[in-house]
Image (cartoon, rainbow, N blue to C red):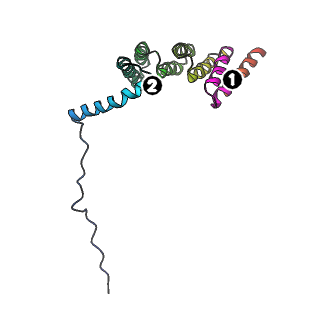
């Protein structure tokens, strides 16, 4: 007996139709903002932002940082630096702003300006391990390994278990030895 082949599979009549995504509606956006606020305010308080006013300042600084990041992606470094200055003026404890400032200067091969950006960050955040590490590395690029060494050593204290500070300490010592022999 010959077996009949089943007919080509057809979509189930009860399956939901495919729908294209639609833009969020205003009341849905409002609900999303309220939800974000309900989540962000407790998170901000956990991060040490002691008041709603301080949270708003942090939020405004974040907007400047995001704008700066977008401008940097568009290869508009001057405009990005202006936004970053607004960011740190509003909220001096924003590590990412100093890091992006230094990165923009680094890509222009302006190592001294990058060092300056990181040192400004260290003034605002004196116990930030990555700022110590990045400042030390930038000082090496600026041909100042003797100045970089104590920052790399401090980074090693602040970032226990991270191998990068030890590598940077060795690099400082190597470059200082080469400078002494030349």
- Main SS of the magenta part reads helix
Can residue 182 be seen here? no
Q: Which one is nearer the viewer's eye here, 56 or 137?
A: 56
Region in magenta: 145-166
| Res. 83 image quadrant | top left
Q: Was residue 55 drawn as part of the magenta stretch in this picture? A: no
Residue 151 position, x and y percent, is 63, 18
- Where does the C terminus fall, quadrant-wise? top right
Residue at mark 1: 169
Task: Please indicate whether residue 30 sits to the left or right of residue 127 in the image.
Answer: left
Q: Which one is nearer the viewer's eye here, 158 or 74?
A: 158
Task: Please indicate whether residue 41 sits to the left or right of residue 117 in the image.
Answer: left
Residue at mark 2: 47
Task: Identify which residue is drawn at 49% across, 18% down.
Answer: 98
Q: Which mark is residue 37?
A: none
Task: Identify which residue is drawn at 69% across, 15% down.
Answer: 146
- Where does the N terminus fall, quadrant-wise? bottom left
Q: Of circles 2 and 1, which is in front?
A: 2
Q: Is residue 26 above or below residue 106?
A: below
């Amino acid at each position: 007996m010959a077996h009949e082949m089943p007919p080509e599979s057809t979509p189930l009549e009860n399956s939901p139709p495919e729908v294209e995504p639609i833009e969020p509606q205003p009341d849905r956006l409002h609900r999303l903002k309220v939800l974000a606020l309900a989540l962000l305010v407790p998170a901000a308080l956990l991060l040490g932002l002691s008041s709603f006013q301080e949270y708003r300042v942090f939020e405004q600084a974040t907007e400047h940082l995001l704008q700066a990041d977008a401008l940097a992606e568009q290869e508009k470094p001057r405009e990005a630096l202006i936004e970053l200055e607004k960011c740190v003026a509003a909220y001096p404890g924003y590590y990412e702003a100093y890091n992006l400032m230094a990165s923009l200067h680094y890509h222009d091969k302006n190592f001294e300006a990058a060092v300056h950006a990181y040192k400004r960050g260290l003034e605002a955040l004196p116990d930030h391990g990555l700022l110590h590490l990045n400042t030390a590395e930038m000082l090496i690029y600026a041909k100042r390994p003797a100045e970089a060494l104590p920052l790399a050593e401090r980074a090693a204290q602040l970032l226990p278990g991270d191998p990068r500070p030890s590598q940077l300490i060795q690099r400082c010592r190597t470059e200082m030895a080469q400078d002494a022999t030349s």
